[in-house]
Image: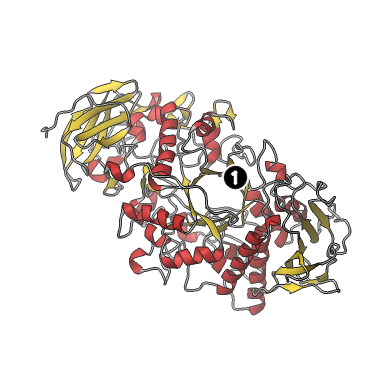
Amino acid sequence: MTGYRLTRGAPYPLGARHDGNGVNFAVFSENANAIDLCIFSEDGETETARLALPERTGPVWHGYLPGLPVGSRYGFRAHGPYDPERGHRFNPNKLLMDPYARELHGTWGNDPAMLGYEAEAPNADLSFDTRDSAPFVPKSVVSVPAFFAPRVKGGHKAGARDLIYEAHAKGLTQVHPDVPEALQGTYEGLASDAMIAHYKRLGVGAIELLPVQAFVDDGFLVESGRRNYWGYNSIGFFTPEPRYFGPEGMAGFRRMVDRLHENEIEVILDVVYNHTAEGDQAGPTLSFRGLDNASYYRLSRGQPRYYVNDTGCGNTLNIAHPYVLRMVLDSLRFWVEAFGIDGFRFDLATVLGREEHGFDPSGRFFAALRQDPVLADVRMIAEPWDIGPGGYQLGAFPHEFREWNDGFRDSVRRYWRDDDHATQDLGGRLLGSAENFDHSGRRSWTSVNFLAAHDGFTLADTTRYAHRHNEANGEMNRDGHGSNFSDNCGVEGETDDPAIIARRQQRQRNMLATLFLAQGTPMLLAGDEVSNSQGGNNNAYCQDTETGWVSWDEADEEMCAFVAHLSAFRVAHSAVRQTRFLHGGTRPRDGLVDVEWSDFSGGPVQWRDPQLANFCLTLRCSAEAPDYVPDLDTVFVAFNRSEEGLPVDLPDTPKGMIWVREIDTCTAEQAETAVGGDAPIVGARSVSAFVLVSAGSE
């Protein structure tokens, strides 16, 4: 098993790098006593050599192996103390994935040999397991260097199309009839002709993909015949998840990004740097735990056998450690440079800002991001919470970040469900949630507004189910959100009652119109535009089935056309997508205020009324906008939550101008209608949007 002889090599770059003559291996471990490099046969089945890395520079172990070709399979074994009560879990019987691996050969198994301890031992994880885990671990691959060479980065091209489309790499196209069968459920399928046409119709500016970094199916799911569908169980931060590869393999991922860019659509990745697939102390030893548990993870103070669990997933990555922070930054930079990724949505992002004293928007992670020239102009989006102390941090992130705004989702649902006090809350949400975000020079697009996301009811299910129906998840319907602010409109689940169906469809249109008319950045869950349902499952994380996939055979074409109309309206009218917050300031250019609230008769809104149902707002260019920002339009929006149509008094009409109704949620079919002398009627339980235009242009 020899035949190889390692030489000194270099401590940088980390990972395996082929230079044309051989491979340099470098891996971080601060607490190991030795690191073995294991070379495997081409099929990954046989370990052909085991060589101790000969050099240690600081905490980096390294060596150079002359003559080793591109495509070679390898892994590491780490020697050191197995002392869980002191935070150390070294076990050289466990083959470890290279944290910097760019490709993997094989798939993860689910076998007790992957545990560092004997599962049946009385002292559980304090015991020591001697079985070799290599048969159940995919092998890291020495990649072709040129394939991952940094590419020329283009600028953002979405422009006025600010719509983000959240989608699953497989579920979006798995059963799409117009996507070629070989591409269904693959990266290539995301950029197929049918999908490109669909994005363009909707006015999508960016597609945000659920995790596509290599992840592991949880053992308890595998044992019950299910899979981790969403992918929030990452293990390879430099590796595209192979299960979504199509005919072109890795090249297909890059081709997908390129084709979306050619059509001026950005690509945002949902990334999980808050925890790994190794779980808590009872979890498997796959990579980080075996290389240096005490460095890679945050351990409980005074009880380092256990893990800090601010994520709810068993462990928490120790971003405060310089080499773990370096890994995260190297990973982000890799996806930008090697694949052209435009931005990232950080799952449980509060974790990334945690310091010893708690969450800090000036913490090490954020400071490092600001100083990185590659990442400086990349779009950053935070999920601004975790489950740890003080975990909910909506509005507290640095100005470079947009933030998912769950408050917007809940406010819209509560308003259209007729909840008391919901109108007052919705008012602030419509103006970009300034109470949360208008500080530190942040822009009004900071709030990422959404009606539904991957975790929760789809938009259609919000109108079909009053309660979650997650029995298929195998957790006795105890998983998933308990507070959905949903309303089944009279019948739980499917119905053939035309009145209930019509009520549900109008409720969807109302909420969609609210989304597209609000200041901020709109995000649409893939499938909501076609009334996709998950049968009331609001936690489809393990549903790699028809439940989790977007159903195109039953696509609601009228709803899709309505969404396309809303998106086109938003692009055409800058008053609903401003860059500065609106506070009712007087505009120097004409003495008008930038936002006005009124009731349907033009009087003041009775904000103290807990059952307030109807209100209007007039939107103009912000009073804070400099002169070079064009004042292109005025938009008047009327919200009617009552059970009857009501006449509405429009604002004064300047000479030579008229009001045109461009949005009316009473019907799916939309048409521009000029308003005559009488007050227009805003239909029962609907939204109307009017635009002031030149009398000769309607």
Image quadrant where one finds the N terminus? top left
Residue 654: x and y in percent read: 84, 63
Q: SS at mark 1?
A: strand
Q: State whether residue 235 is above or below residue 499.
A: above
Residue at the spot 52% in from the left edge and 61% down from the top edge? 526
Quadrant of the rendered image containing residue 115:
top left
In the displayed structure image, the side of residue 263 where residue 120 appears, left or right: left
Residue at the spot 42% in from the left edge and 57% down from the top edge? 169
Residue 417 seen from this side: no
In the displayed structure image, the side of residue 307 where residue 42 appears, left or right: left
Give the residue at mark 1. 403
Residue at the spot 66% in from the left edge and 73% down from the top edge? 670
Three-letter code for the amino acid on which mark 1 is drawn: Glu
In the displayed structure image, the side of residue 266 where residue 516 appears, left or right: right
Residue 184 seen from this side: yes
Q: State whether residue 679 is above or below residue 371.
A: below
Residue 78: x and y in percent read: 28, 29
In the displayed structure image, the side of residue 29 where residue 77 appears, left or right: left
Residue at the spot 56% in from the left edge and 40% down from the top edge? 387
Nearest to the observer: residue 144 or residue 155: 155
